[in-house]
Amino acid sequence: MKIFLDTANLDEIRKYNDMGLLDGITTNPSLLAKEGGDPHEAMEEITRIIKGDVSLEVVSTDYDGMMKEGKKLREYGDHVVVKCPMTGEGLRACKSLSEQGIPVNVTLVFSPNQALLAAKAGAKYVSPFIGRLDDIGHTGMDLIKEIKQIFTNYNFNTQILVASVRHPQHVIDAAKTGADVVTLPPAVLGKMLGHALTDKGLKAFLADWEKLQADNSNKT
Ligand code: G3P
């Protein structure tokens, strides 16, 4: 399963990229707004740091606008994936951009039928938002299971990109379901990395080493 980071924070992107953990990045207008500054500069810098797929989202809602923006975003690099919303106009743009060799990530997917239609329109990725479904009392992971079954039944090449991930258990469940990608807020990736027993074990190793050094220096 590929791991993308779901952020526009350049420090977090550099940090986890330096550990070799990142297969790509997803951004959206809200994540860019959270960081402030010039969003175009930020998007360009992200595409410089990351060599894997970088999803950059259009803000137009009409077909012509999305096509124009999508082509402009793609100028940042051949690894840019244009994120289009799950609307009729978005799917029309998805079809055209995909036919022109520009990969598309269809975002804001909340049902198996929406994922099916995005795949039919040629999307490289569909982004089901599982956390937001959990928030309204559904089980977001059930959506991933249903999409996986549908895509497997009909051999769709479209990849399932699990989005709106809230905690490490979502990642384990996504991996067990066979999702292609999870996109993670930096805080979730940080939680996956750490464990209290790792910290405790390391502290003990270092204390024992210090004791050994002290014992040896007392002998000399
Ligand atoms: O990439 C967008 C998606 O991950 C949004 O997550 O936390 O705003 O529901 P969230």
Image: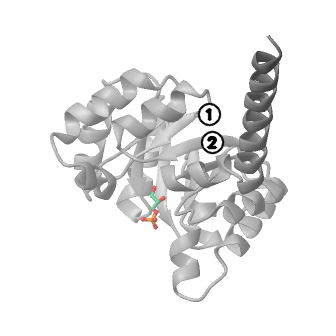
Q: Mark 2: which secondary structure?
A: strand
Residue 160, percent from left and from top: 65, 52
Cα separation, mark 2 vs mark 1, equals 7 Å
Left or right, 72 with respect to 23, comes to left
Choose mark 2 or mark 1, whichever is in front.
1
Residue 46, percent from left and from top: 36, 31
In this rendering, is residue 155 above or below 167? above
Determine the quadrant in which ligand 1 lies: bottom left
**What is the quadrant of residue 4 in the picture?**
top right
The amino acid sitting under disc 2 is: Ile
At x 63%, y 42%, the residue is 3
Q: Return the mark for residue 72.
A: none
Left or right, 181 with respect to 42, comes to right
In the rendered structure, which disc, 2 or 1, sits on the residue that comes first in sequence? Answer: 2
* Other-residue count near label 2 (Cα within 10 Å), few / some / many at <14 / 14–19 / ≥20: some
Q: Where, quadrant-wise, is the N terminus in this rendering?
A: top right
At x 24%, y 47%, the residue is 64
Residue 163 in sight in this render: yes
Q: Return the residue found at the far left.
A: 37
Nearest the eye: 158 or 14: 14
Residue 81 in sight in this render: no
* Other-residue count near label 1 (Cα within 10 Å), few / some / many at <14 / 14–19 / ≥20: some
Q: Return the mark for residue 21.
A: 1
The amino acid sitting under disc 1 is: Leu
Left or right, 7 with respect to 161, comes to left
Q: Return the mark for residue 3.
A: 2
Residue 7, percent from left and from top: 41, 47
Residue 62, percent from left and from top: 25, 57
